[in-house]
Amino acid sequence: MRKHTTPYVDLELLDNGILIATYKKQMQITLDMARQIVRDRLEFAGRTPRPLMLLNQGVVEMKRAALRYLSTAEGIAGISATAVVTGKANTYAIIELIMKLHKPPFPIKWVKNEEKAMKWLQQFLPPCTNESDKSTSSWPPTQPVTLVKD
């Protein structure tokens, strides 16, 4: 497990490949902040698609330009699925807006606890391979985008 702290998000890359991003409290995310968040994430975890668990500790606002940027190819690089852990209705509203306007090419699920998020994200981990098995598989899996309120 590796950890990295940034001004806006604490990142943790688990041994199984799941990336956890914990947003700091009382944030109003601007375009510049969104760009920095993506740069930090890509620098820390790379561009290999992996499941992402977002822990929201209180993002209070996301500017429209930031939302648009986070929905671009650059903004979603390195993500195969996202589980958003929060009990806040405004976060669910942001997720719904992203889904309706920007339609990310991977599944997103809203859950109320980390255990459910972890269980759901497991299915998006790449299959294990070893040196004797040189078979190739399609990764990341292509699935229709769904938003599930848990």
Image (tube, grey):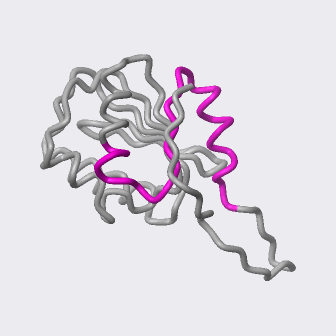
Please state if 10 lies on the left or on the right of 66 as rendered: right
Asked whether 133 or 3 is in front, the reply is 133
| Total numbered labels | 0
In the rendered image, residue 13, in percent from the top left (x then y), is placed at: 52, 46
**Magenta span includes 15:** no
Please state if 92 lies on the left or on the right of 63 as rendered: right
Question: Quarter of the image containing the N terminus?
Answer: top right
Q: Residue furthest front?
A: 100
Asked whether 42 or 105 is in front, the reply is 105
The quarter of the displayed image where residue 89 is located? top left
Please state if 104 lies on the left or on the right of 49 as rendered: left
In the rendered image, residue 135, in percent from the top left (x then y), is placed at: 79, 81
| Residue at image point 38% right, 28% down | 92
In the rendered image, residue 145, in percent from the top left (x then y), is placed at: 50, 51
Asked whether 15 or 99 is in front, the reply is 99
Bounds of the magenta segment:
98-126
The quarter of the displayed image where residue 86 is located? top left
**Magenta span includes 122:** yes
Please state if 66 lies on the left or on the right of 2 as rendered: left
Q: Residue furthest right?
A: 132
The quarter of the displayed image where residue 117 is located? top right
Question: Quarter of the image containing the C terminus?
Answer: top right
Relative vertical location of residue 1 with respect to residue 76 in this rendering, above or below: above
Relative vertical location of residue 93 with respect to residue 64 in this rendering, above or below: above
| Residue at image point 40% right, 43% down | 4
| Residue at image point 64% right, 52% down | 124
| Residue at image point 32% right, 44% down | 98
Relative vertical location of residue 136 with respect to residue 59 in this rendering, above or below: below
